[in-house]
Amino acid sequence: MSLPLPAKSYVDPKTAPDIERATLRRIGSYIRPYRTQAALVLLAILFSAMLGALPALFVKHIVDDAIPRSDTSELILLCVGMVVGPLLAGLLGVVQKYLSAYISEHVMFDLRVQLYEHVQKQSLNYFMTAQPGEVVSRVLSDVQGIGGMLQDNLVKLVSNSIVLVTTTAVIFWLDWRLALVALCLLPLFIVPTLRVGQRRKALKRTVQARMAELTGILLETLSISGALLLKVSGAESHEAKRLRAKANELKEVSLRHNLVGRWFAMMMKLFEDMGPALIYGTGGA
């Protein structure tokens, strides 16, 4: 005799809600209490991006002005600026990460409390029909995923957007012809990036579903009632096999989620290394 096997969660990528204005407003409502910290994060990202563009400008002045004129003082000043700029950008990055983590942890706290209070208001029929462990997984794993999105993905999105704008402005100011050559390669990465992102999104939802099922098995078998039932029925080995099978499913889908897009990442790194060669080669020609 063994405990009943919960129904396997099926995750259809087509059921994922679209990002609409209502969704964005709801996300904003959780960040609004921490708008001061969010504004400081934006300022830190903006100034970090601007400071990160300074070395390229300093190199231009070193090559075009300081070295041809044999101006040692200007050369030393520009070299110091090439060190101080990234150093200040790094310090702002530390501040930005602290504030991002602060916002993320507080948003997760608010979500967990709100979700727990909402679940408590449900009828007994809800708890009788809900899959074991699903509610616990929503309160723990899903909220943790939202916090990771706020601290990592959302900040990266804003940071990369600002860096793209500032870098584009700098390279156009340096040489518009080389800038056009560099930007011509950008559309080649848009479609593959979207496809990889959609695939990772679908696999992430599957990982969350498998985690909920595994949590359900643990809650069933490790509670006092579940442990008593296992010992009375002698089903310890059977439940161990069931747990091993469910954990293996989670391992496989997590592995696929972590490795998806690895070839695309390799090509991105390759083009990143080839970019300077193409730019300098075109400029020299």
Image (cartoon, helix red, strand yellow):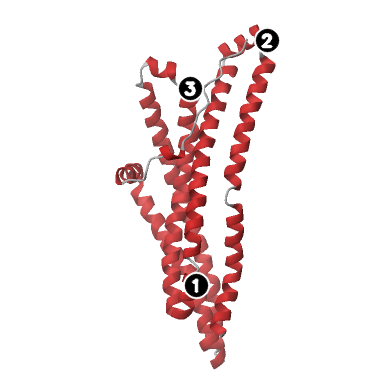
In the rendered view of the protein, which quadrant contains the C terminus?
Answer: bottom right
The picture places residue 63, in percent across and down from the top left corner, at: 55, 85
Q: Give the SS element for disc 2.
A: loop
Sequence order check: which comes first, mark 1 or mark 2? 1
Which numbered disc covers residue 123?
A: none
Q: Which residue appears at 30% of the width and 43% of the height?
A: 22
Residue 237 found in image quarter = top right
Tell me, yes or no, whether the two marked residues, 1 and 3, touch with CB atoms within 8 Å. no
Question: Tag 1's secondary structure?
Answer: helix
Mark closer to the chain start, 1 or 3 = 3
The secondary element bearing badge 3 is classed as loop
Give x and y (percent) for residue 218: 58, 22
Q: Is residue 22 left or right of residue 149?
A: left
Mark 2 or mark 3, which is nearer the start of the sequence? 3
Q: Position of residue 203 (x, y in %)?
A: 53, 41
Residue receiving disc 2: 234
| Amino acid identity at mark 3 | Gln
